[in-house]
Every structure is written in structure tokens, then in C-alpha cells.
Amino acid sequence: MLELKQIKKDYLSGENCVHALNGIDIQFRESEFVSILGPSGCGKTTLLNIIGGLDHYTSGDLLVNHTSTKHFKDSDWDTYRNHTIGFVFQSYNLIPHQSVLSNVELALTLSGVSKEERRKRAADALKQVGLEDQLHKRPNQMSGGQMQRVAIARALVNNPDILLADEPTGALDSKTSVQIMEILKEVAKDRLVIMVTHNPDLANQYSTRIISLSDGQIVHDSDPYQTDGKT
Ligand code: ADP
Ligand code: ADP
């Protein structure tokens, strides 16, 4: 459903060129929980941003449902970002003084559905993350774990095929991290979840596949389906 072919990403900073990604090949499947691990600066966030259409690749190709994105127009990228992808960040990125329900509803503003339907879908998404009785709270009254649940609900409200999470538990204590991982594991039952993490224990315990990066290259991919043509 999602495939990266020889993806490279260079950043120009002053006179220097940083090779952030150096020929990445990955084939993702419809429902797996993939963790991306690796030391700081190895290219994890760059990879996630390219998969999410937030950043351009320098060369190679990203295929979405077997379709190359090389000739995607701005409107194709908009559709991809709004309908195929949901994004969760370490820092939640919620609007602090608006209700939880409005925060989630806002993600549906461009969806063309009625206000009533938006409310209903937002409430359903919040129920999925166990916040059905907190709809009228504001993020600035909530704990980090609760805010991350709101962010997950917001990412899911458009019913995307792919959920991307950049260090979703980076700011949380270990008990709360486990609660968030349980939610992501549920989410990954019927969609693709790709998570960047610094925490190999959480990756090992919850994900179905681990990809390790070093210096912009894949050094290990535990792809459970990979047979190297030998079987
Ligand atoms: P990670 O998420 O693994 O910490 P990043 O993807 O953030 O790594 O960064 C990979 C490399 O690309 C690093 O060397 C980083 O300094 C560089 N980099 C990331 N973003 C930019 C940018 N906007 N401009 C220049 N260099 C960047
Ligand atoms: P530029 O770097 O040319 O100023 P921007 O980062 O402002 O470009 O993005 C311009 C538009 O290019 C984006 O809104 C997006 O729709 C489109 N775009 C083209 N290629 C890609 C890509 N590989 N990933 C994400 N967006 C892309």
C-alpha cells in the first residue's frame, strides 16, 4: 500500500549538504505496527515527514497504492495529507483553550460534512481513545497522556489508512507511555501505524516490525513477511 524506493533526502545548509536519507527502500503493508529506531540525527523524523507528505524527497520514489508520487500536484499532496495520513507529534500540537471536542472537530473542517456530523465523528474518535466523558475539557486542564489521546483522536477522525507518530511518548512517563502504546496497538489492527521512537523496549513490546536507521540508511528491518525469495 505504501512503498519507498531508493528515497534520498539532502538538506543544503550554507555551503554544506547533509545527506539525511541515503537510499531508503521499504514496503509497508496495510496493517502493521512499525517502529523506526536509531540514534539522534540518523534521519527518523525526515523519513516520517517524507512519508507524510510534509517534506519533499530529493530523489527516489514514494508509491501510494502502487501509484508513483513523482508527478503529484499540490492538490494531490493535499488530498494525500488530509485523507490518507494522520499525524501525531511528541508535543501534541493542540489548541490549549478550545475544548477537546473542538480540537478534534477542527480536523474535519475541510471535509465537507455538516457540523452535526463533524460533532458525531469527533465524539466517536474521542470514545475510541477513552475520552468520551471529557469532551468539554480543555487541553490546558489535562495531563500529557490525556492530551496525547486527544491528538490521536484528531489524527483518526478522518479515518486515514496510515497513522504516523513522531516520538508519541517522548514527553510521557513510563506508565502513561504504556497506555498510549496500547491505544496505538489497537489502531494498528486495521491500519498502518508507523512510529518513530527512542525507546527500544516499547518498540519490541508493541510493534510488529522494527526498522533501524543509522546515518540515513536502514541497518536492520525485521520485516516478518520478508522471505528474500528463499521460501
Ligand atoms: P532524527 O529524527 O533521527 O533525529 P532528523 O531526520 O531530524 O534525524 O535529521 C537527520 C539529519 O538531517 C541530521 O543531520 C539533521 O541535522 C539534518 N536535518 C534535519 N532537518 C534539517 C533541515 N531542515 N535543514 C538542514 N538539515 C536538517
Ligand atoms: P518549496 O520548497 O518549493 O517552497 P513547499 O515546501 O512550500 O515548497 O511545498 C510546496 C508544495 O509542493 C506543497 O504544498 C506540496 O503540496 C507540494 N509537494 C511537491 N512534492 C512534494 C513532496 N514530495 N512531499 C510533500 N509535498 C510536496
Image (spheres, helix red, strand yellow):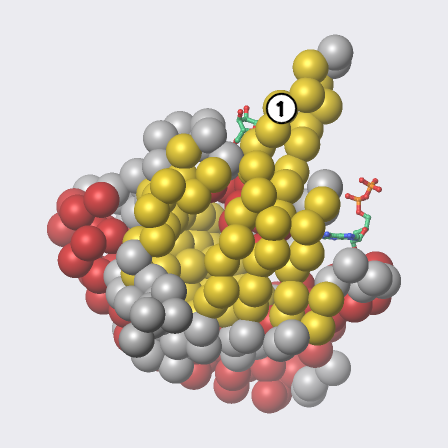
> Residue 143, how many percent across, how many down?
29, 49
Foreground of the two, 10 or 102: 10
The foreground one among 79 and 156 is 79
**Callout 1: CB less than 8 Å from ligand 1:** yes
Q: Is residue 101 in view from this perspective?
A: no
Residue at image coords 72%, 66%: 68
Answer above or below: position of 20 versus 218.
Answer: above
Using residue 94 as the reference point, say whether residue 50 is left or right of it: right
The residue at which mark 1 appears reads as: 18
Q: Whole-percent x and y of residue 58?
A: 72, 41
The kind of residue on which mark 1 rests is: Val
Q: Could you tell me which quadrant the N terminus lies in? A: bottom right
| Dot 1 alpha-carbon crowd within 10 angstroms: few under 14, some 14 to 19, many 20 or more | few
- At horizontal 22% and vertical 44% (from top left) the residue drawn is 200
Q: Is residue 193 visible?
A: yes
Question: Along the line of sight, which residue is nearer the eye, 176 or 11?
Answer: 11
Q: Residue at x 83, y 62 (%)?
A: 71
Element carrying mark 1: strand
Q: Within the displayed image, which quadrant is ligand 1 positioned in?
A: top right
Does residue 198 appear left or right of residue 165 in this picture?
Answer: left
Residue 69, x across and y down, in percent: 74, 63
Task: Work out which quarter of the rendered image holds the C terminus and state it.
Answer: bottom left
